[in-house]
């Protein structure tokens, strides 16, 4: 029952994310299916719920609160959901101001702070890649602290860790892109600092 409630909330949040700028692009629909993997036997049901949810942005807060409630003992899952929503937002090549407002509101409902929001955002914004933001640290940190932040990010985002902390199967595969972003950030910093 919890898994079904989460899946419906994820579908609705994703569809409403795509609609938030007024236009649901094919790239956004494709991005949704990249983040939400469901069994073939459920595909028609998912399509039906997605189409209904994308008709209007209204009500997305209810679904965000539902996700927050389901994972009140595991707030990192909310970060994973926000990460997936960023994936959809950037899938058509740009983050529209209405999409950014939507994402900020979802982040507020999930009770994520600005640092978490910026860190998750940094994984998706190739135009202003800040490797320090990707690792969730400040540029002034010492080399050892930067290395520790990178190792912690790798541990926290490994698929086995996601599974252990109860991340639903539908979105565990997102860790591959996140891991690539984390390792890319470390490589940029490592080369910049000569470590």
Image (cartoon, grey):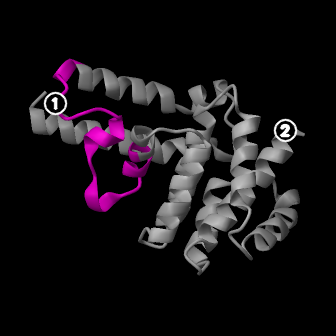
Q: With 27 as the anchor, is 135 left or right in this view?
A: left
> Residue 29: percent from the left, percent from the top?
64, 70
Residue 193 in the image: state x and y as whole percent: 10, 33
View extreme (left): residue: 194
- Which residue: 71% across, 68% down? 58
| Residue lying at 59% horizontally and 80% vertically, measured from the top left | 22
Choose mark 2 or mark 1, whichever is in front. 1
- What span is in magenta? 118-144
Provide the secondary structure element on which disc 2 rests.
helix
Confirm whether residue 93 shows in the render: yes
Quarter of the image where the C terminus is located: top left
Q: Which mark is residue 2?
A: 2
Tell me: residue 97, above or below residue 116. Answer: below
The answer to whether any part of residue 38 appears in the image is: no
Tell me if 40 is positioned left or right of 87 in this view: right
Element carrying mark 1? loop
Q: N-terminal of the two: label 2 or label 1?
A: 2
Q: Nearer the viewer, residue 175 or 115?
A: 115
**In the rendered view of the protein, which quadrant contains the N terminus?**
top right
Q: Is residue 187 magenta-colored?
A: no
Report the residue at 73% width, 58% height from top: 11
Residue corresponding to mark 1: 140
Asked which quadrant contains residue 46, the reply is: bottom right
Does 150 sit above or below residue 97?
above
Q: Position of residue 170 (x, y in %)?
A: 70, 46
Left or right: where 190 falls relative to 183: left
**For residue 2, side relative to residue 125 (left or right):** right
Q: Give the x, y percent position of residue 99.
A: 51, 66
Which residue shows up at 55% across the image and 47% down it? Answer: 107
């Amino acid at each position: 029952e919890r898994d079904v409630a989460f899946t419906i909330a994820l579908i609705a949040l994703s569809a409403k994310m795509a609609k938030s700028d007024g236009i649901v692009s094919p790239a956004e629909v494709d991005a949704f299916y990249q983040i939400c993997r469901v069994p073939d036997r459920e595909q028609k049901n998912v399509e039906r719920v997605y189409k209904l949810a994308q008709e209007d942005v209204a009500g997305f807060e209810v679904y965000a609160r539902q996700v927050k409630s389901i994972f009140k003992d595991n707030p990192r899952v909310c970060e994973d959901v926000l990460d997936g929503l960023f994936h959809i937002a950037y899938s058509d090549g740009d983050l529209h101001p209405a999409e950014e407002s939507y994402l900020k509101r979802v982040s507020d409902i999930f009770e994520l702070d600005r640092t978490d929001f910026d860190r998750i955002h940094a994984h998706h914004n190739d135009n202003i890649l800040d490797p320090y933001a990707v690792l969730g640290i400040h540029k002034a940190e010492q080399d050892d602290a930067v290395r520790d932040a990178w190792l912690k990010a790798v541990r926290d985002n490994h698929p086995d860790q996601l599974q252990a902390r109860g991340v639903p199967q539908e979105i565990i595969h997102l860790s591959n892109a996140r891991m690539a972003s984390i390792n890319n950030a470390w490589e940029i910093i490592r080369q910049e600092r000569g470590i």
